[in-house]
Image (cartoon, helix red, strand yellow):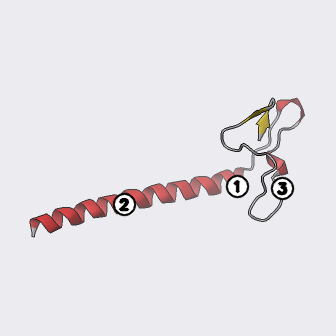
Amino acid sequence: MRVRGKPTPMNQNPEKTRESGEAAADNQAMPGGVIRVDEEMIRSHLDKVVVSTVEQTLNALLDAEAALLCKAG
C-alpha cells in the first residue's frame, strides 16, 4: 500500500498477492491520496494475532504453575 509515494509499514509491496493468488488491488493507493482497506483481511490478521497472544499467555501461566507444583512436591 502506498500513500503519496511512501511505503506504509504494514505492506511494503502494493503488488503482493493474497493467498488466493489474486492481486491485492483493493489495497493500492487511489487517485487523490485515497486508499482502500480490506477490512476482512485486517480482521483475519487481528484474529490470528489475538489467538496467538492468548495462547502464549496461557501456556506461560501453565508452565509457571507446573514449575510451582514441582517445587512444592
Mark identifier at residue 58: 2
Given the image, on which type of amino acid does mark 3 rest?
Ala
Within the image, what quadrant is residue 22 found in? bottom right
Residue at horizontal 82%, vertical 43%? 28
Out of 21 and 33, give the one closest to the viewer: 21
Q: Which residue is mark 3?
A: 23
Q: Which residue is mark 1?
A: 40
Given the image, on which type of amino acid does mark 2 rest?
Leu
Crowd class of label 2 (few under 14; some 14 to 19; many from 20; radius 10 Å): few
Q: Quadrant of the N terminus?
A: top right
Identify the element where label 1 is drawn.
Answer: helix
Tell whether label 2 touches label 1 (CB within 8 Å). Answer: no
Vertical comparison of 3 with 18: above or below? above
Residue at horizontal 38%, vertical 56%? 57
Within the image, what quadrant is residue 19 found in? bottom right
What whole-number distance in Å separates the C-alpha atoms at marks 3 and 2? 37 Å
